[in-house]
Image (cartoon, rainbow, N blue to C red):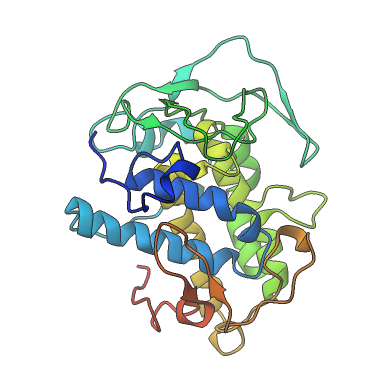
Amino acid sequence: MKLPPTHMTAADAPFYPGVKSRYDEYVATHINYTLQVHDTADFFAWHRTFIHFWEQDLKNLCGYTGVLPYWNWALDAEALQDSPLFTGDEFSLGSNGAYIANRTDTWLAVQDVTVPPGLGGGCVHSGPFANVTVDLGPLDLPNTKNVNSSFQYNPRCLQRDLNPWFVQNYNTYTNLTATLLDNIYIADFQAAAQGYNSATNKFGVHGGGHWSTGGSMADFHSSPADPLFFLHHGMMDHLYTTWVNLDTYRRQNAISGTSTLGNSPVSPEMTLNDTLPFGFVASNVRFADVIDTFGGLLCYRYD
């Protein structure tokens, strides 16, 4: 698969040896800002804008004429392995990873949770992304040889490890509805969606979506290496938009939090006048210009 060339300058290139294509620039940008766009005030707004720029590149650089779809993981919660997204046919997003046998449970230290192995673990072996090469990461996958440098060139196959345990515990319609209806304040909604500040909901629908696919999607920093990332965050944006629309008067411009993960290091509370950084992907944008799907930079709705 031939990918559009990079947009980076010759001066930047030596600092990003693993960036070989326009696609890699999206992965590198997410790596660069991972600790500034998770558990932060701009988590939803930043990712919304990130996938917007991706959609524009699909249209302008690749000739795509559709819109960016979203993955409603709640529809697949009962039988993830049977999802039409992962059949491996030409209309899917490719297969699961090849099955790796004789694996044991994995302890995830950050969440202090032990999880069973998934149903794959190896390379995506059929479908549109079977021959994709992932150039960057992983930086933080358990039981994996992670790279030593954020932008090290590390070519390998796209990996997946579908794991029903995650969607059945974190991404059902019950989880989705509770996230929407049980959190009337933006700070609580952000935390619940991402799985922060809870003894029982340690992944949220966001983390559950990433880990339910496993493999490349489960790496905190380089997860956009799997194209499924953009459909997952389409669903996260759908969730956020729905939450806002339940009480537009109070929620449209609701904002809470700083610009650093867990406010470490300590940083000022963000405001709608702050700018959101996008590195190689696009110019920075003002928070206020992406807080509304019908205002500023954006113009779209969900059916």
Work out whether 184 lies above or below 152.
below
Q: Residue at x 50, y 44 (%)?
A: 15
| Horizontal side of residue 152 vs 295, given as left or right | right
The answer to which image quadrant residue 261 occupies is bottom right
Left or right position of 33 against 90: right
Seen in the image, is 213 located left or right of residue 270? left
Instruction: Give the percent coordinates (x, y) of residue 21.
Output: 33, 42
Instruction: Pick the residue in front: 200 or 260.
Output: 260
Find residue 140 and report its horizontal and vertical position in percent: 65, 35
Residue 157 drawn above or below residue 110? above
User: Image height check: is 117 above or below 77?
Assistant: above
Q: Residue furthest top?
A: 102
Residue 160 at x, y percent in the picture: 48, 29
Quarter containing the C terminus = bottom left
User: What residue is shown at x 58% (from left), y 44% (from top)?
Assistant: 221
Q: Residue at (34%, 77%) from the top-left corner?
A: 299
Asked if residue 75 can be seen in this view, the reply is no
Tell me the residue at 33%/53% (across/down): 7
Q: Position of residue 42 (x, y in %)?
A: 60, 69
Front-most of 109 and 94? 109
